[in-house]
Image: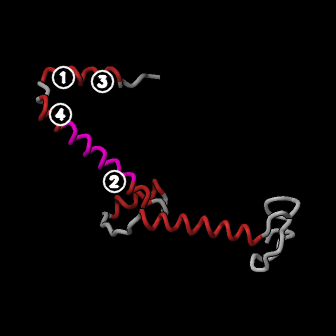
């Protein structure tokens, strides 16, 4: 407990939180915290859904090493979003190929050469 603070259940003013003059009560902080928590929890429930996935142990160990034990869900969500974005891009390219025709081999070589030149790693 913070020095000078009383229990949140008592609703007494507290000199240790928010201001030195004791303008805020412990109960007002508890109320605000509870309100924010309920709003956050409610929005998370409406936007998220729990699923079960089967992942081999090597892959899961690598994910946990990178993301930590509590970051597996966010890591998998980010990976899924990346994959969905890549698939959407491939779909767009397929649509462009259908509309304007696929690029020929000479154009593919030119684009690949330009990409190598642009993204060439600089030596230090």
- State which region is magenta: 78-93
Residue at 28% x, 43% y: name it: 86
Circles 2, 4 touching at the beta carbon (< 8 Å):
no
Q: Mark 1 points at which residue?
A: 109
Q: Is residue 99 magenta?
A: no
- The image shows residue 14, relative to residue 95, as above or below, that is below
Does label 1 or label 2 sit earlier along the sequence? 2
Residue at 23% x, 23% y: name it: 111
Quarter of the rendering occupied by the N terminus: bottom right
Q: Mark 4 points at which residue?
A: 96
Does label 3 or label 2 sit earlier along the sequence? 2
Q: Residue 109, position in %: x, y?
A: 18, 22
Does label 4 or label 3 sit earlier along the sequence? 4
Badge nearest the viewer, 1 or 2: 2
Circles 1, 2 touching at the beta carbon (< 8 Å):
no
Dot 1: few (<14), some (14–19), or many (≥20) neighbours within 10 Å?
few
As helix, strand or loop, the secondary structure at mark 2 comes to helix
Residue at 79% x, 60% y: name it: 18
Q: Nearer the viewer, residue 62 or 29?
A: 29
Q: Name the residue under label 2.
A: 80
Report, in whole angstroms, how far the alpha carbon at label 4 lies from the one at label 1. 19 Å
């Amino acid at each position: 407990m913070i020095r000078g603070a009383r229990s949140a259940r008592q609703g007494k003013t507290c000199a240790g939180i928010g201001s030195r003059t004791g303008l805020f009560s412990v109960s007002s902080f508890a109320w605000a915290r509870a309100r924010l928590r309920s709003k956050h929890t409610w929005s998370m429930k409406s936007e998220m859904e729990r699923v079960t996935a089967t992942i081999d142990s090597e892959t899961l160990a690598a994910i946990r090493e990178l993301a930590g034990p509590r970051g597996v869900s966010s890591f998998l969500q980010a990976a899924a979003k990346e994959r969905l974005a890549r698939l959407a891009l491939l779909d767009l390219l397929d649509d462009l190929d259908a509309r304007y025709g696929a690029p020929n081999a000479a154009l593919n070589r030119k684009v690949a050469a330009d990409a190598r030149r642009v993204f060439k790693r600089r030596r230090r």
